[in-house]
Image (tube, rainbow, N blue to C red):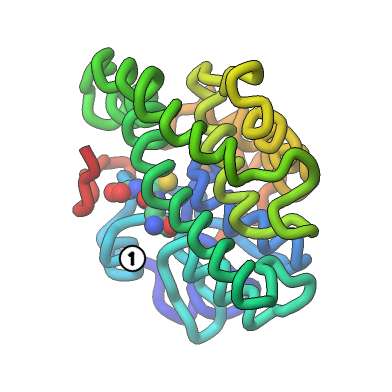
Amino acid sequence: MPDEKTLTLGPVKIVGSFLSPMVRKALAVLDIKKIPYEIDPIIAFMGSEAFGKLSPVRRIPVLIDNDITVSDSTVVCEYLDEQYPEPAVYPKDPVNRARARWLEEFSDTRMQEVFSWHLFNQYTINPLMWGEPLNEAVVEHAKTVEIPHILDYLEGVLPEEGFLFGEVSVPDIAIANHFRNASFVGYKADAERWPITASFAERVLAIESLKKLNPYEDKLLETQPTEHRKVLGEMGVPLVSETLGTDKSKRGFMIIK
Ligand SMILES: N[C@@H](CCC(=O)N[C@@H](CS)C(=O)NCC(=O)O)C(=O)O
């Protein structure tokens, strides 16, 4: 187990895999703000006992910056924006700030539940970690009922051009990241039915701070989780010296059905 000094000294550290939309949210913010970081690219379900101590909900991302260790991508991004204010990644005025918070929350809760648990995890985590076959009914319901309901809502609130609040901000990234994970398992929003949402997702996913992560995501998708750290190291990713990952899988506490 790494001692606390190893974890807290040096550049910002992020615990969590490039395959997580929540981790990529934090990584994009670090990149936009040009904050160097090291990463421990673990899947939450393969965290050690030490990981459980750092992240009592056993979720990623976790951020460690000198004296502070926090979980939850929103808390991480808000901390980064306050500690390293330029360039800002949230709008400043109270009305837009509230809208930004709501859209980020919508993405982190409802979109996460449907896109991650009912879609992406069905094809990836469930068979790989738990040996569970894909649940066709869950996936079908996600594709035909839950996702369309989400996209109908987004179609009315997303901008036809540009980003939500001028410069790219956290809710743009949070929302678009779910479409990237959906693409990993072959789902793409129908651009005829949801033209605004489909083009928004494409536009946000094309920003440099997200696009530069694509090669790592693509590589991880074809690599066994136990080899993730090794292949990323070979690709030149700055890794933390000691991992909080293990070879064993363990279910999280906060199960979303
Ligand atoms: N609200 C949290 C959600 C984090 C989350 O659900 N992360 C996933 C990976 S994308 C995870 O750690 N799942 C493991 C679990 O829920 O047990 C955040 O925004 O960070």
Quadrant of the snapshot with the N terminus = bottom left
What residue sits 58% from the left and 36% below the top?
Answer: 155
Q: Residue furthest bottom?
A: 67
Residue 57 pos. (x, y %): 27, 61
Q: Is residue 215 visible?
A: no
Image: 251 above or below 143: below
Quadrant of the image containing the C terminus: top left
Residue situated in front as seen by the camera: 181 or 171: 171
Find the residue positioned furthest to the front. Answer: 156
Q: Is 177 drawn above or below residue 137 in the view shown?
A: below
Out of 73 and 203, give the one closest to the viewer.
203
Q: How many marks?
A: 1
Which residue is more in the foreground, 44 or 184? 184
Q: Residue at x 52, y 55 (%)?
A: 103
Name the quadrant containing residue 177: top right
Name the spot of residue 162 as percent of width and height, x first. Answer: 79, 46
- Per the image, the residue denoted by label 1 is 55
Any part of residue 185 in sight: yes
> Quick check: 137 left or right of 86?
left
* Left or right for 204, reference 99: right
Question: Which residue lies at the image location 74% right of the left edge and 55% below the top edge?
Answer: 168
Question: In percent of the image, x 48 and y 73: which residue is there?
Answer: 7
Residues packed near mark 1 inside 10 Å, few (<14), some (14 to 19) or many (20 plus): many
Q: Whole-percent x and y of residue 127? A: 29, 22
- Residue type at mark 1? Ser
**Residue 3 on image: x %, y %:** 40, 75
Mark 1 residue element? loop
Q: Ligand 1 within 8 A of label 1's CB?
A: yes
Looking at this view, is 97 or 174 the one in front?
97
Describe residue 87's horizontal placement relative to residue 123 as left or right.
right
Q: Quadrant of residue 220?
A: top right
